Image: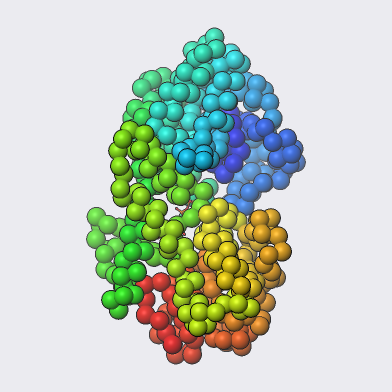
Amino acid sequence: MKIAVVGTGYVGLVSGTCFAETGVDVTCVDIDENKVEKMQNGVVPIYEPGLELLFHRNIEQGRLHFTTSLEEGIKDAEVIFLALPTPPGADGAADLKYVLQVADQLGHILDHYAVIVDKSTVPVGTGEKVQAAIAANAKVDFDVVSNPEFLREGVAVDDFMKPDRVVIGSTSEKAAKIMDRLYHPLVRSGNPIIHMDLRSAELTKYAANSFLATKITFMNEIANMCELLGADVDLVRKGIGTDSRIGKRFLFAGIGYGGSCFPKDVSALAMSAGEVDYDFRILKAVMDVNHGQKTKLISKVSQYFDGDLKGKKIALWGLAFKPETDDIREAPALYNIEALLEAGAKVVAYDPEAMENVQGVLGDKITFAKDAYTALEGADALMIMTEWQLFRTPNFEKIRTSLNNPAIFDGRNLYDVNDMRQQGFYYVSIGREVAK
Ligand code: UDX
């Protein structure tokens, strides 16, 4: 089987590489010449655990190819995935220009039957637009399918290889059969391939991400209540998570969700609702609460320094929006840095993977440390922004002696409150008692 993947971002590159691993011949197409040349020379353009091994193996075995030419890439491909960016436009709605441009080109050059698959997260109705854009010039038969991707950054390879479910939106039996054949190796454990119509598949992706963002936000509000009522959010989490209707996952309170998907998708679904005159009130509240949650710790840091952060040096552990990625899109750390700098504080940060990306955005506005403990030297307090494993069992003695004040503001609830109290730290976390 031969397939093409157009767009080599996170989703495209992971999908292409993983399909190659199942024995399929994959050609990845991207307009970025520089990126394609690097990939042809064996350089993986993103950090994603486990990807590099599969990437090199499949290039060596001749199953994974890269090109800038769409025409060359789709030659003989039975399935053509569109994994193109759909960034939020000025109005918050997903911008479809990249998807529709490629659809238009496909209409001109397609010379055999193929299944065109929308893998990007796109508003309901996009599949029909893609269909129309191709059909305007197409000389051959084709089908358009929606196949939303649910992989998480940091565990993308695993998520792709062992999906909880595969959603296929199409009313064409021929296309559905081809998709089943392609996905068969990934669902051998018995997880389902769920077939539905195009529109339902498109909405499924938005509903999943918006539900998860709502779940996190609900817990963040419970955490805020815990602080006011003297309860502990970690205990409440355990207390409710054991109810199988609620589930244990995605209940961790913190400094808000970030990343490339949740913020964009919640806003896009709220926008789509507006377009059909539906006021999706929960989503508006989710966006509002999450915005406030991101910088929630700042007022507590400020309070600790009697309202004056001018000249204070704050060490930051973690910049990525979550562990095991170098992705800083919508990362809470960036919002905290902005607020700290605005208040006149100095920031010195450490992150195992994301420092280069932040430097690209902030330049020398903040300092970057070579390791976690160097960041603490002469700092007045430590703020924890990302729950990298390496921060979970630190050398507390070293933290205390390096900091000017033994103060930790933890946005990810990494440590035990009583333990921190016994060790003499001033320790503020989310939805739990303050240790003083
Ligand atoms: C998400 C979806 O999980 C995935 O299915 C979809 O395809 C893309 O969007 P991703 O953005 O990689 O994946 O990150 P995820 O691990 O889901 O975390 C999203 C955000 O929620 C992060 O900022 C994370 O810190 C936050 N989060 C997650 C919490 O604050 N609490 C939790 O309990 C879980």
Q: Using residue 80 as the reference point, say whether residue 246 is left or right of it.
A: left
Quadrant where the image shows the C terminus: bottom left
Q: Using residue 16 as the reference point, say whether residue 418 is left or right of it.
A: left
Q: Which percent across, then down, holds residue 174?
A: 41, 19
Q: Which percent across, then down, holds residue 140?
A: 52, 11
| In this view, 318 is above or below 134 | below
Residue found 31% across the figure and 66% down from its top: 222
Q: Using residue 296 as the reference point, say whether residue 395 is left or right of it.
A: right
Quadrant where the image shows the N terminus: top right
Q: Using residue 187 as the reference point, say whether residue 74 is left or right of it.
A: right
Q: Which percent across, then down, holds residue 108?
A: 59, 15
Return the residue nearer the eye: 239 or 283.
283
| In this view, 103 is above or below 276 | above
Residue found 57% across the figure and 77% down from its top: 309
Return the residue nearer the eye: 84 or 39.
84
| In this view, 292 is above or below 374 | above
State which image quarter holds ligand 1: bottom left
